[in-house]
Image (cartoon, grey):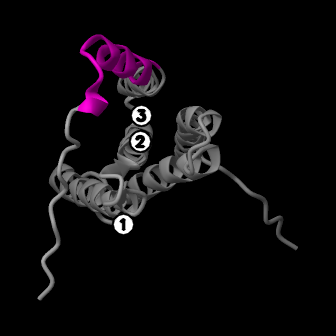
């Protein structure tokens, strides 16, 4: 009887490590969102980052493209465009418009989902410097930019006295 074991070649190990880094990156960004009580947190952003990385890693394994730089480039470009467009629609689902209070909510969450997918693609491409910079900058924006916005608003006067921005009206046909 033949031994059917799980043998991973170096390419498989490299791919698994890229996916593991993607999960860690997504979870790191998601931790901030969980701590702030937002709907997308560790699990969601970990999955978004993993999914984007997985699709990109799989695109490297399409039969017949290895060794053909033009074909590899075209496939990878299509994958990146598809993932980022699809994630844009997912992010749009978390944006809420409150016409009574004249507020829009969820834009930061939507942008975070989109950036996390981009980080997943960077993990698949093993762009380690860009991954570190991207995670650092994303966390900087998520952690420090909100208090900075509040501080600037307080220094510029009470903005609530101004008329709220008007939302575009919907025309029904």
Q: CA distance from mark 2 to mark 1?
A: 33 Å
- Tag 1 residue: 63
- Tag 3 residue: 126
Q: Earlier in the sequence, mark 2 or mark 3?
A: 2
Tell me if 159 is positioned left or right of 28 in this view: left
> Does the residue at mark 2 contact the one at mark 1 (Cβ under 8 Å)?
no
Q: Residue at x 34, y 59 (%)?
A: 100
Residue at the limit of the structure toward the right, as seen here: 1
Q: Can you give x and y, in whole percent of width and height, for residue 77 in the image?
A: 22, 54
Q: Kindly report the secondary structure that dominates the magenta region of the rendered protein.
A: helix
Tell me if 101 is positioned left or right of 9 in this view: left
- Tag 2 residue: 112
> Does the residue at mark 3 contact the one at mark 1 (Cβ under 8 Å)?
no
Is 154 or 141 nearer to us in this picture? 154
Q: Can you give x and y, in whole percent of width and height, for residue 46 in the image?
A: 57, 46
Q: Secondary structure at mark 3?
A: loop
Is 23 or 45 nearer to us in this picture? 45
Q: Earlier in the sequence, mark 3 or mark 1?
A: 1
Q: Quadrant of the N terminus?
A: bottom right
Q: Which residues are magenta?
A: 144-161
Q: Secondary structure at mark 1?
A: loop
Tell me where residue 161 sits by quadrant: top left
Q: Residue at x 33, y 50 (%)?
A: 104
Q: Can you give x and y, in whole percent of width and height, for residue 142 in the image?
A: 45, 28
Q: CA distance from mark 2 to mark 3?
A: 20 Å
């Amino acid at each position: 009887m033949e031994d059917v074991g799980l043998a991973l070649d170096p390419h498989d190990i490299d791919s698994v490590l890229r996916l593991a880094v993607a999960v860690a990156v997504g979870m790191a960004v998601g931790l901030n969102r969980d701590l702030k009580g937002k709907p997308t947190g560790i699990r969601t952003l970990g999955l978004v980052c993993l999914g984007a990385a997985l699709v990109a890693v799989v695109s490297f394994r399409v039969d017949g493209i290895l060794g053909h730089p033009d074909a590899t480039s075209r496939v990878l470009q299509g994958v990146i465009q598809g993932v980022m467009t699809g994630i844009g629609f997912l992010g749009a689902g978390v944006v809420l418009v409150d016409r009574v209070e004249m507020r829009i909510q969820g834009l930061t969450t939507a942008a975070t989902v989109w950036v996390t997918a981009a980080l997943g693609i960077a993990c698949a491409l093993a762009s380690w410097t860009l991954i570190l910079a991207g995670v650092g900058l994303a966390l900087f924006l998520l952690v420090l930019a909100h208090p900075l916005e509040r501080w600037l608003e307080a220094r510029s006067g009470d903005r609530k006295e101004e008329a709220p921005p008007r939302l575009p009206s919907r025309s029904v046909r």
